Image (cartoon, rainbow, N blue to C red):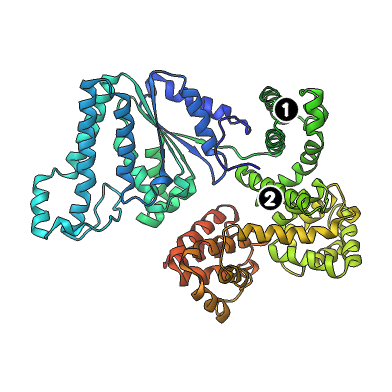
Amino acid sequence: MWNDKESSVDYLHFEEIAFVAKNILEDESLRSTSIGIFGSWGSGKSTVLELIKNELNQKDEVIIICFDAWLYQNYSDAKTSLLETIQRTLEKEVSKVESIAEDVKKLGKSIFKLKNLLPLLSIAFGTATSIATGGVLPPISPALGSIETIIDNLEEQSSDSEIVEDIRKSFSEILNKLKKNVIVIVDNLDRCLPQKALETLEAIRLFLFLPNTSFVIAADVDMIKESLESVFHADSKHRNDYLDKLIQFPIPVPKLGLAEIRSYLFMLFAESHKLPSEQRERLREKLKVTVAAYEVGELSPLKDILDCLDAEQQEKVRPTFQMCDSISVLLSKIPTVASNPRTIKRLLNSFEMRKLISKNQSINLEDEVIMKLVLLEKIVSSQQMVNFYHLMKTDYSAFEKDLKILEQGKESQISPEQTKAIENLFGRGKLEEVSDLIVEWAGVPPHLSASPNIKLSAYLYRKAMALQVQYQRLSDTSLEAIRILSNTNVMYSANAKEIISRIPTNEIDSVMDEVIKNINNSPSWTKMNDVNGLCGAILLAENQPTVKEKLIDFFTHIDKTKNNVWIKTLIKRLRGK
């Protein structure tokens, strides 16, 4: 299986992005700059950052400082967390140079002052004070004493603007003495709540345009704009202005096309088959050429790609590569999967998990059949998958007949007979938007109607679904809540409200995650009523405010691709606007 970690090996052909970024950072006339690596969740931003780091690590005159914004999500103030990370890295760098070490200690003292001044201001004046963001700060320890004592302490402190200037001055002096370039790489802003994401960006502004200091920031632009609207109520013009002033060089991460998806599948399976590193590199270089060639021609034949490997390795990967070749076109068309490397990895992990269960239970389903069924789960909703397996179990002859009708493929459009077969297999839900995909899926080899063990796939599905939820060790109450909420389609459900009140506090997050997964598989988003389980998720968010932000974040991402008025209205409702 594959983890979600960023890769230092370029499977996605993003080297060109890293090369462009490296050249900007090494240009002497651009030594004080900011680069934005922009892309949606799971698009490969962290991998691009890793490739940039690999390029820069070869340079002795560069100090690289990495800041993972998500790690400091629950810290009281994300701004000072970034400042402290920079200060600690510089401290290690100059530990043997006494004169500069003193400057770094001075920088640390200024950051410490800033960190302690903000809460003092907050408690003394009854306001939530921060540098430019208006961030809400944590309560002050009673040990600080009375308001009079706090005001006395304030008189001994510098103002926040003076401290900020001290920080900038100390930092500049350190870099002048070091004669090195500092490059700060910021990742995982996407995973932060709006307030924390903006606090991190405000901290970056403290260092912008200082000599020999550059930033590389990975972010989802839409998420940042949404955060600006949420926290500052900024309009469209001001959201764009903010980003334009903060990021001098925006570099978008390109979406994966058919050739890139196919290439990515080949490389992931080459890794799982444990091909020798030299063979994998040979394959990677070959695929790089074929992806470029696809821009002006057709996909390279699988035989041409396999020819770059030794005969033994060819035979090892051939069946899996043939499977990847047959599904890549369909995979590139599935909206919930296409162009997102992280989602593709998770799909392959589902496939591998089913394979393990199949082998352990001696079910002996062909790999191609397992993969095809996993793909179907990304096209239709979870309820429609239940309908599919229910028909298979209760009336196999009708199931087989309908499958064969779909497996005939379509000509110019889907026939009435095929429309009826889709309804028979999946129920009468909203399927218009995915009918073409379903027929295309049915035509991908192998045909399920000809698989001798297809009936056993229902058992495999049930086991896999149970594992996906139960690996979290959820209580029976939470499992029941997931079932009820995922099938709640009215806002006045007594059953839903009753089960919500009984969910253990430490499992509410996990329940919302599972309900959102089911919503995400909804085949139709035209109207609010089309989305299975939406009302259940809203009820959970309104009755358990701790997970409301999670649902808002989900619909904010969905809104980027669906762009439906009802989604925007729902987001405003959840925010109480």
Q: Amino acid at mark 1?
A: Thr
- Residue drawn at x 60%, y 71% is 480
- Residue drawn at x 82%, y 30% is 315
Q: Look at discs 2 and 1 and give the one toward the viewer.
A: 2
Q: Which one is nearer the viewer's eye here, 96 or 360?
A: 360
Q: Residue 29 at x, y = what percent?
A: 38, 21
Name the residue beneath numbered marker 2. 350
Q: Which one is nearer the viewer's eye here, 334 or 508?
A: 508
Q: Which one is nearer the viewer's eye here, 245 or 292?
A: 292
Q: Amino acid at mark 2?
A: Ser
Q: Is residue 93 above or below residue 474?
A: above
Q: Which mark is residue 290?
A: 1
Label 1 element class: helix
In the picture provided, is 227 more to the left or to the right than 178?
right
Q: Residues within 10 Å of mark 2 (few under 14, many from 20)?
A: some
In the picture provided, is 79 more to the left or to the right than 576?
left
